[in-house]
Amino acid sequence: MTQQMATMLDPGALTIVLAGTFLATLARCGWHDLRAAFTALRKLTQSSFDAAGNRKSLAKTVREIALTGPLCADVPMPPDPSLARLVAAYLKASSLDVLHSAKRSERANREIARAQAVRTFEYAGELAPVFGLVGTLFAITQLAPLANASPVEITMEAIATAVLSSLYGVLTAHLICIPIARAIERRGEREEAAREELIEWFDAQLSPPRREPSLGYSKNIREVA
């Protein structure tokens, strides 16, 4: 089994596929999108959105605001950076309009960053098979006879490199790049739904209760009419 795996390893072909895919993706997307992609990839290895911890922090914030008012409240910020910026904006301005504006801005920024990361890995998935073909073409160029080398050996080595290059390209695309793009997308959607639920709860706790007109007041209106 170990010997079979060793025959599947060609460092030269792997370097062509990985390095070529990286450079071509960088040329197409730029450093900004590439940084967004690596940031999203790093978050996949971290713990998921802590809904319970963030809710606990928001509950403390609501209680402190009720006791001292938003401008004097000294509360621990939620673990989620986006929620923390939203709470800080509200505490600074003491305005629900500012809260709603910050909510829209934070959500737009998250969606943009997620779209950049997903698009970058999708581009890498498109380009990896292309550089698998590049590795194949490079292997064909190595069919030229060399001194002290058997033509059969040269041909077999070139064919092996050509086949492995194409294989590396397909595997890189469909087992690494595209699955990562979908994983970033799914995790982002789950976290967005959980975050939105907490924000709506926080907003509802801060909003003043609606006053319904009394029956007597409604009756007086009808009598005047």
Image (cartoon, rainbow, N blue to C red):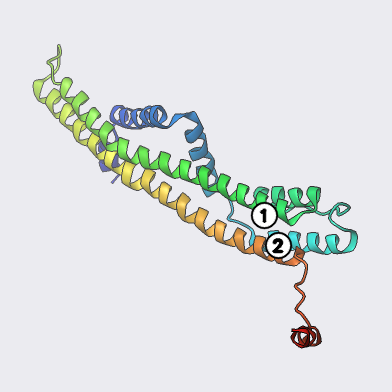
Please tell me which residue lies in front, 111 or 161: 111
Q: Is residue 198 left or right of residue 188?
A: right
For label 1, the SS is helix
Q: Is residue 137 above or below residue 193?
A: above
Residue type at mark 2: give it: Asp
Residue type at mark 1: give it: His
For label 2, the SS is helix
In the rendered structure, are the residues bearing label 1 and label 2 in contact, judged by CB atoms less than 8 Å apart?
yes
Where in the figure is residue 44, as x and y percent of width and height? 52, 49
Please tell me which residue lies in front, 206 or 223: 223
State which quarter of the image contains the C terminus: bottom right
Distance (Cα) linking label 1 and label 2: 9 Å
Residue at 46% in and 56% down: 186
Sequence-wise first label, 1 or 2: 1
For label 2, the crowd category at 10 Å Cα-Cα, with few meaning under 14, some 14 to 19 and many 20 or more, is some
Q: Which mark is residue 100?
A: 1
Q: Is residue 17 above or below residue 92?
A: above
Residue at 64% in and 61% down: 51
Residue highlighted by disc 2:
203
